[in-house]
Amino acid sequence: MAIQSIKGFKDLLPSDTERWDQIEREARRIFSLYGYEEIRTPILEFTEVFSRSIGEVTDIVEKEMYTFPDRDGRSVTMRPEGTAGVVRACIEHALPSKSPAHKLFYMGPMFRHERPQAGRLRQFHQIGVEVLGPSGPSVDVEIIALLADILDSLEVREGSLLLNSIGCPVCRPDYLASLRAFLEERRDRFCENCRRRIAANTLRVLDCKVSACREATADAPAFSQHLCPACDAHFDAVRRGLTGLGIDFVPAPRLVRGLDYYTRTTFEWVTDRLGAQNAVAAGGRYDGLARALGGPDLPGSGFALGVERLVALCAGPLPPPRPLAFFALLGEEAARLADPVVRRMRREGIRVERDLLGGSLKSQLRRADKAGASLVVIIGDEEIKRGAAVVRDMNEKTQAEFSLSDLPEIIARHLQPSSSGR
Ligand code: HAM
């Protein structure tokens, strides 16, 4: 049997990549409008980068990471997300000493050994941003606005923004104590995982998907009622900022996120069009992360959107770009004459296709039609004798003969004004 790809790792075929390309292009355009710069960090990092940031008692670190010893015996991990590596890189290259604010974006594959299902892969792709330095609420508002603009530019208009605040080291201990007391009183009603987490990772009990656990936490104390004055003011400013920009949000007291590094703002963009995997993008503030990685005090805030999920929300695959002209060539001599013209046009930025399969004129014309070319240039023995080519206008159903040297100009003329080829 022929070798197949690994479960949860997907090929992107040409019929997929046109849409991916559009998404990445749109995201880059919007990043540039907002003044975000690209960072590319390695796919493989020392395991501590993730275990110290994401948290030892999280699904990702406990059971989803692709971790193995490398040939020197060091434990390495294929990045399950982008934030930890970006913060590690900022510390390593002392970026905070160079400027007080860094607005960064990244795109690329992430790896989690989850159970594959619709919208959940083992290799998936994120487009993310991280703002390092400023700690104020306007950053949180800005990244959410940026996310909304990306979705809007791709005409993904449904979905809701869930918003919460999970406090800071000042207010969290009190909140956790009252939450823990509440959970302990109902210990018997929780799944085994949650029972373990009551002590080890109390907050996560709130976002367990098991319905009995959800019922048992329905009237759990909400963090928003326990925020310290500074977190309360921050959360209030984020909400006012979003309202000022006309961005709707839904307060989500259970939104604690599956990664431990968050402080204050957390958010998720969810839609009911994706089944169980309903989060298209998610993020929040992580003011303590740089310190946890051994770095300086470096507040941060960011999000990542799942490209596969975003693609699923876009309206189907995009058609491939159509060539303006298709050269149907009958014989070697025709190819010899046509190739310099084809190359010249491509170098001038005109999308031109040249038949590579040979065969009869009829079969080449069929391929030209399939490619969606608006002009077909035909060169056969008769045309060669006259140093000419027949140019057939596929839309007007007309054709005329031109000298080979006039071809680029004749074809370029078709670029204006409305037959530009897509
Ligand atoms: P996350 O919620 O783990 O956050 O992932 C962000 C997004 O990546 C999800 O909303 C989802 O769209 C996509 N995603 C996650 N896992 C999978 C999967 N197995 N298959 C397909 N798509 C998936 C983070 O990764 C944080 N680093 C986000 C962040 C950036 N927070 C601050 N800055």
Image (cartoon, grey):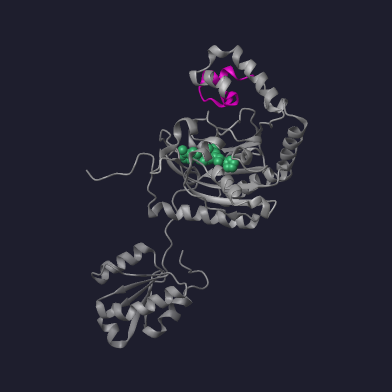
Answer above or below: position of 183 versus 129.
above
Quadrant including the N terminus: top left
Identified at 48% across, 73% down, the residue is 415
Q: Is residue 280 visible?
A: no
Identified at 35% across, 39% down, the residue is 7
Query: Looking at this view, is 37 or 407 the one in front?
Result: 37
Q: Residue furthest left?
A: 1
Range shown magenta = 201-220
Residue 359: image location, x then y, percent: 23, 69
Residue 412: image location, x then y, percent: 46, 76
* The quarter of the displayed image where residue 259 is located: top right
Q: Is residue 136 visible?
A: yes
- Is 208 in the magenta? yes
Residue 301: image location, x then y, percent: 64, 43
- Is 215 in the magenta? yes
259 to the left or right of 44: right
Identified at 34% across, 78% down, the residue is 338
Q: Main secondary structure of the magenta part?
A: helix
Query: Looking at this view, is 150 or 267 the one in front?
Result: 267
